[in-house]
Image (spheres, rainbow, N blue to C red):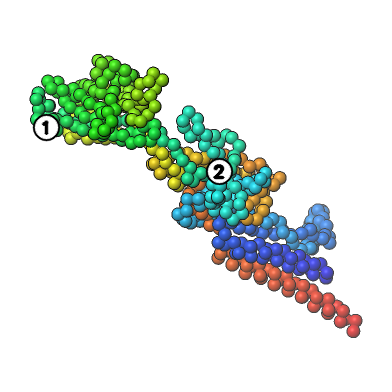
Amino acid sequence: MMRSLYAGVSGLQNHQTRMDVIGNNISNVNTYGFKKGRVSFQDMISQQIGGASKPQEELGGVNPKEVGLGMSVATIDTIFTQGNLQSTGNTTDIAISGNGFFVLKNGDETFYTRAGVFGVDSNGTLVNPGNGLRVQGWMAQNVNGQQVVRTSATPTDLVIPVGQKDPPHATENVHYFCNLDKNMPEIPENPTDEQIENGTWPTTVKIYDSFGNEHIMAMNFRKVPGNPNQWTVTVDVDPNGEFNTNTRIGMGTTDGVENTYTLNFDNTGKLVSVMDSAGNVSNEQGEIILQTSFEVADANPDADGNPYRQTFNLNLGTIGSMENTVTQSASKSTTKANFQDGYKLGYLDTFRIDNSGIITGVYSNGSTRTIGQIAMASFTNQGGLEKKGDNTYVESINSGMANIGESGTAGKGSMISGTLEMSNVDLSEQLTDMIVTQRGFESNAKTIQTGDSMLETIINLKR
């Protein structure tokens, strides 16, 4: 008789545990990155009243007679299914689509989380503002003038230096591609102003000196009289400025040349050669790069006492090509593209985070620069992680060691900036489980009540 009482007690206790887990799931239905728990039951040891016997010649076999002694909790699992994504518009809110965890640090302690509610503290460090844990990743390093992120290194704190200066950068390269109108009229001898204007294709490109000052490089294209497929180009930096920049342009050097060069085209409109004012010609297949220099006002002279000259490369495209190069066709003269890599002094205004977790700084001067990259961790058995509160987990002896790397590798998901992952708790499922748990609890209580009633009946036999 006592066995049923204790079986009922085990049912009450363990259904109460299940109800605790359900209550925790429901309370975190709106917690970002929360992963629901699930309770699994199993029966306890059974008492054997009679053993099994094998079949005999005259009789068949007999099954064992066993009475169960109740039930116990088998597992309390954390279910890591994907939660719905909610757009917030906040750059530092990041959701993980797929597997993986963000890596957080508190001194030497390492934590992992799915909740990407991040922000920047007063030192510019990317943190979880709810608990101050620092987001881990890799800061970009300057390698030969390029910002490079080395994800093979040990992750460290990520610092976003909002307001940091971006020093001016002198223009080093200009890429200039255009089409010249084959039908543009030639400029005759002793031309009028109108004839000069109609026979000239003027273009301008904005460039910068080492101080960050802005300059205008003007290039005027004119057809060479008597040669229908040849153009003379005059280059002048700040042609309308008060200071004479003494612009020069040549093949590989600006020594001994003037500010003009000549373009030669074939009958299909493809560029076949370029010649500078000193007669140096380039007609080999490949990119045409002219060296251009100009004097910078109010600059210290060079070591020989000559005015300081700034030099940059002018890329006109590829000889023999019609793509991304200077061409001559019977259509309106049009600049297809120009690019220059200089800029003035700027300050870090804002930043953005892409799907790889790369943080790119956007400066007030229009330049962009890689700041760092957010790290992600994955585990062989993520269900083996231990919860530490604040939406965080830590490694356990059954989770395996963290595999930390960039997103999109080794089974890791991608990051989505401006979005947060909602809880994966299904409220309708939890309410249904609550009803089932309640009925199970009531039934076990009824077992105890019935067993007590039977004991009372036995006691009353003596009266």
> Extreme right residue here?
462
Name the amino acid, label 1: Asp
Q: CA distance from mark 1 to mark 2?
A: 61 Å
Mark 1 vs mark 2: in front: 1
Q: Is residue 437 above or below residue 265?
A: below
Instruction: Give the residue drawn at x 19%, y 24%.
Output: 231
Residue 214 appears in the rendering: yes
Residues at circles 1 and 2 in contact by the CB criterion of under 8 Å: no
> Residue 158 — which label?
2
Point 65% across, 47% down: residue: 106
Pick whichever of labels 1 and 2 is earlier in the sequence.
Answer: 2
> Could you tell me which secondary element the residue under label 1 belongs to?
helix
Q: Is residue 293 left or right of residue 51?
A: left
Structural crowding at the residue carrying mark 1, measured as other residues with C-alpha within 10 Å and reported as few (<14), some (14–19) or many (≥20) = few
Residue 287 visible (yes or no): no
Question: Which of the 4 image quadrants contains residue 192?
Answer: top left
Q: Secondary structure at mark 2?
A: loop
Q: Residues within 10 Å of mark 2 (few under 14, many from 20)?
A: many
The one nearer the camera, 90 or 364, is: 364
Find disc 1 in the rendering and name its residue: 193
The residue sitting at 33% across, 19% down in the picture is 253
